[in-house]
Amino acid sequence: MFSIIKNGFTLVELIVTAAVLAIIAAIALPAFQHYMAEQEVKATISKLILANRSAKNSAALHHANVVICPSAGLTQCEPAKWSSGFIVFTDANKNRQVDAGESILQTEALGLEYGTLDWKGGLSLPSLTFQALSGLPIGSNGSFYYCSFTDVPNQKIIMSKMGHIRIENPSSC
């Protein structure tokens, strides 16, 4: 006698398994997107705080103006491109642009997916400058605004005239 060996699943088993996986995915996807949005906010705030501290220290240490400006290509300042990334560089001629002989100290690619980032400063300039003599952001006090596309709270990262940072949760951007 020969016995028939079944290798595989029946159509009903496959349909039930696919349905269970679809239900699990439908429940998990919104929670995963919320988690990713929260992580984006935390990472963005951490990068901004670190860049501000680094720029302040570099300005005082090297006795040179240090600028933080938005940049999509991470080589030149590009106004209104904070959501793409930013660069930190020494600004010897004080024109707030990367020129020959000025070194880029730090680059940060952000590529935000769940929100936007913008800077609104005291002088209406699209960048921050830390002064050579004191390391302070004189004339560059203001706030970064992270405006979320999701239900994650908006964030306002406020920089004082002394270069201190605090974070608030505004109701709108």
Image (cartoon, rainbow, N blue to C red):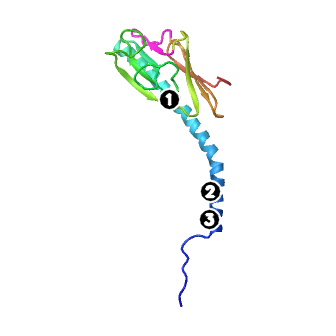
Give the residue number, with chain letter if any, for mark 3. Answer: 14
Image location (x, y in percent) of residue 148: 62, 30
In front: mark 1 or mark 2?
A: 2
Which disc, if any, is residue 118?
none
Magenta residues? 126-139
Which disc, if any, is residue 46?
1
User: Quadrant where the C terminus lies?
Assistant: top right
Q: Quadrant of residue 65?
A: top left
Q: Is residue 99 above or below residue 172?
A: above
Q: Is residue 62 left or right of residue 6?
A: left
Image location (x, y in percent) of residue 153: 64, 30
Which disc, if any, is residue 21?
2
Amino acid at the residue labelled 3: Leu
Q: Residues within 10 Å of mark 1 (few under 14, many from 20)?
A: few
Amino acid at the residue labelled 2: Leu
Name the residue at 48% across, 9% down.
Answer: 138
Total marks shown come to 3
